Amino acid sequence: MHDLQLIEGVQRGERAAFEVVIVRHQAAVYGYLRARLLQHSDAEDLTQEVFLRFYLARARFDSSQLIRPWLLGIARNLLKEHIRRNRRHREKEVGWTQMCLELEETLPPEALACAATDEASDHLPVCLEGLGESAKEAIQLHYAENKRLADIGEKLRRSEGAVKLLVFRARQALKRCLDFKTRGKSADETA
């Protein structure tokens, strides 16, 4: 079935069409969430929530659009809710997820497919190690410890503006490294 036929079927409440949507897109949605969450159980729970919200909002879906971008948009919104809900309880994971979302905003569209897998999370520790000491510390303080830029500036003996630039450049370096690692691996596998 083509996406248009699927959506029309889902909008009519056809269970078979909804099951096909899940089968076709579940791995991509789970991969997107898993790459941005430390706990696989959270990714599984949020994946189920994505499809529940998709089903509940099916009447509002524009059938001229593709299904996967809409599902990934729901997943992104759920990640933001997840961050707000868990900010106090799981600072490290929230920081990781927030950094992934910010990196994602800088990735070109063709790299998003690579970022939607566990591959990006496999490479991130290596990419983090490639940063300079002050950049690593700023990233750690900002995302893992949820420190404000002004507080990081005091610790690193830099102005708040300098820390903001340092964090921005570190994110750019991480983006380039992840892009290189995921594309490089894909190129090696196809050779």
Image (tube, rainbow, N blue to C red):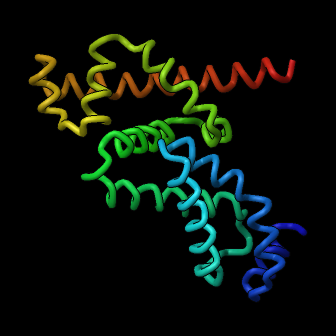
Q: Residue at x 57, y 74 (%)?
A: 53
x, y (%) of residue 49?
A: 55, 68
In what quadrant of the picture does the N terminus appear?
bottom right
Question: In the image as oriented, which residue stretches furthest toward the bottom?
Answer: 12
Is residue 186 depicted above or below 105 in this figure?
above
x, y (%) of residue 179?
A: 60, 26
In this image, 21 relative to 57: left or right?
right
In this image, 40 relative to 136: left or right?
right
Closer to us: 161 or 185? 185
x, y (%) of residue 148?
A: 18, 37
Q: Where on the picture, by quarter, is residue 14?
A: bottom right
Is residue 125 depicted above or below 81 in this figure?
above
x, y (%) of residue 101?
A: 45, 44
Q: Where on the picture, by quarter, is residue 65?
A: bottom right
Closer to us: 134 or 164? 134
Is residue 18 depicted above or below 111 in this figure?
below
Q: Residue at x 18, y 33 (%)?
A: 149
In this image, 96 relative to 71: left or right?
left
Question: In the image as oriented, which residue stretches furthest toward the front?
Answer: 41
Q: How many numbered marks are there?
A: 0
Q: Residue at x 12, y 31 (%)?
A: 151
Q: Where on the picture, by quarter, is residue 25?
A: bottom right
Q: Residue at x 27, y 24 (%)?
A: 138
Closer to us: 104 or 146? 146
In this image, 190 relative to 39: left or right?
right
In what quadrant of the picture does the C terminus appear?
top right
Is residue 122 depicted above or below 78 in this figure?
above
